[in-house]
Image (cartoon, rainbow, N blue to C red):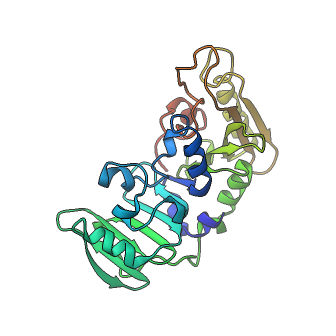
Amino acid sequence: MNALDALPESSNKEAFRYVDTTVVRDLLAKDEGLYRAFDDYGFPPFEATYSQRRPDRDAWGFDETDMFNAVTAVQDPDFSRVAGEFDPEAVKRALKRQGYRSRSIDGGTRLEKPGEDTVYEVSRSMFIARDRDQMTPALPPVIPELSLADDPAYRTVTRCLGDVYAADYWPKTNKDDVILLAVGARLGADGSLSEKACALSRSKQAAERTAVELRTLTVEGELYAGAEVVVKDGDLPLVSMTWKNGQDPDSPSTWGPGTRPGEWSSETDLLKALGWFGGP
């Protein structure tokens, strides 16, 4: 919810990924293969810029120990934001070695490189990557006047997800049966891994239709065999589906849908069943 509180209300038109980088750091240390969907810490520039998926202090002026969480666009990663504790001077020195030039803006420092479309901005609490065409005179406020956390749909779906270390939110829609969809990755107290999809529906009838579609994916031999589908009552009912992560004991070298956390974006069958078809 703190991460949603930092995103302006206008972000409801975007699909984005949230990653709790403090949790993911420990998970990656245990098993890079299992958690590979998060090995860029939810911040694609780490991979795209320097061909390495983890932040390096020499290259960036900070590393994963300085990060709290990251939010980035899922479909078109032209805006990403990391919250944490940063040394802007260290970031400036590191990026200048890569050919970036710095200048002060309201709230922090902007770094640009001739010929590069990605611009970086840094303050003591944020590190941002954005497309050159999106530049603004100032860094975004830490808490905007109206944020996604003020939107009842986002609050409801986020409560449905529960305690997650990563989540994908798709844009709010004005068509079909689903208003808002999110999928989150969860870590149990016993170390068990699961994921949960939550869809806020327009009506009881819409929720039942969505549940029927989801259950077709949970029968034996299907993508999410054994997953649990639940419909909650309400004026805007919630439909959820929960499944366990982990390797197939009969084929441990095979990674299929639902087995590796965070690989939901490519699961078009799941998205279609939840009523999301590619945009608002």
| Residue sitting farthest toward the left | 115
- Asked if 180 appears above or below 65 in the picture, the reply is above
Q: Is residue 86 left or right of residue 23?
A: left
Q: Quadrant of residue 206?
A: top right
Residue 118 position (above or below residue 77): below
* Residue 243 coordinates in the image, percent (x, y): 69, 32
Farthest right residue in view? 233
Q: How many numbered discs, if any?
A: 0
Left or right side of 50 for 17 = right
Q: Residue at x 26, y 71 (%)?
A: 96
In the rendered image, residue 256, in percent from the top left (x then y), is placed at: 54, 24
In the rendered image, residue 21, in percent from the top left (x then y), is placed at: 56, 56
Nearer to us in this view, 218 or 67: 67
Image location (x, y in percent) of residue 240: 71, 40
Q: Is residue 91 above or below residue 52?
A: below
Residue at 35 percent of width and 69 percent of height: 120
Location of the N terminus by quadrant is bottom right
In the image, is 274 to the left or to the right of 89? right
